[in-house]
Image (cartoon, helix red, strand yellow):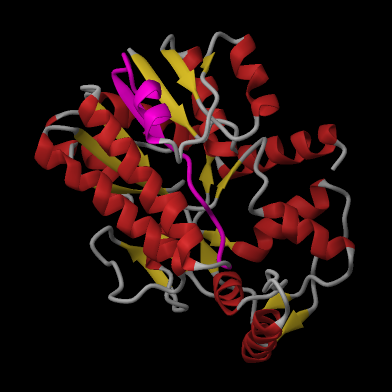
Amino acid sequence: MKILVTGASGFIGGRFARFALEQGLAVRVNGRRADALEPLVSRGAEFMPGDLSDPALVRRLCDSVDAVVHCAGAVGVWGPREHFQQANVGLTESVVEACLKQSVRRLVHLSSPSIYFDGQSHVGIREEQVPSRFANHYGATKYQSERVALGAAEFGLEVLALRPRFVTGAGDTSIFPRLIAAQRKGRLKIIGKGLNKVDFTSVQNLNDALFAALLAGGPALGQAYNISNGQPLPLWDVVNYVLRRLELPPVSEHIPYALAYGLAALNEGLCYLRPGRPEPTMTRLGMAVMAKDFSLDISRARRLLGYEPQASLWDALDEFCEWWQRSGL
């Protein structure tokens, strides 16, 4: 099988491309940072450079591949809708069109459980429990791009979408780096009581899920899947485990949720008024994410993909910490 991995210079796309090579697949990669793709090329990946906003390039990328694993897109909670619309929905439309024109058999679309975020606690949320309104442009456009991808099944494309929660391991630059930076500056505080339990996903388990999505058939097609380690854990215990492993003091000071939320709202308002609208260091959604229970029901992935988490979160955290220390970050 020959596959294309978009967004392969990022954490998830890069880790899956390497995993796919190890499984014996032929892998073509595209990503924004050519230097980050050099290790994949040295392992045998075919690198085709270019901007995914160019439909002609996307068609060339999809030429002669059996499947596309679409990991490229914009992430974050701040910025104009147009940015997220183009990077998430626009690129997905281009990928779907190219898959259909080049007779690609399957598309595995990387979505996000951010579509569920509404500032409230959720335990065991199921795939169909999508809110009527989205918390931000990221969640809205990730869901819209997922609908675009899954809608292509009408034209014969085999499509599956995965929604992995808090993916971590070596190379993770999104979950812990900001927390580490805040603690180094003495600014990190436990939001609320600090008892909230959340889901994480080892990147190794996500690799297994993505690989299963490439091979699954029958009733598994045309579905969206929650992916996690299936074992919600107290968020602040996990954060402090990482801090201790990195020989940083654990966070122990609390701030009431209402106060943190109010300060975040003020921070957002000030940034909105400043030239260029810089991203705030605190957001209301961020405070909710750090204070509320949030876990996924992964029974659909278990039933239809045969997904069963094998790698523990603690192994993934150790992997992250060892990588972080080697990198001198």
The image shows residue 74, relative to residue 152, as above or below, that is below
Where is the N terminus found, in terms of image quarters? top left
| 275 left or right of 196 in image | right
**Residue at left offset 83%, top offset 64%:** 183
Query: Is residue 112 something one can see in this rendering?
Result: no
Quadrant assignment, res 185: bottom right
| 196 left or right of 212 in image | right
- Residue 121 x, y percent position in the rendering: 44, 75
**Residue at left offset 37%, top offset 37%:** 308
**Residue at left offset 70%, top offset 79%:** 271
The image shows residue 9, relative to residue 301, as above or below, that is above
Magenta segment includes 68: yes
- Residue 230 x, y percent position in the rendering: 42, 50
Magenta segment includes 77: yes
- Residue 21 x, y percent position in the rendering: 49, 14
Magenta region: which residues? 55-78
Which of 297/174 is in front? Answer: 174
**Residue at left offset 55%, top offset 24%:** 49
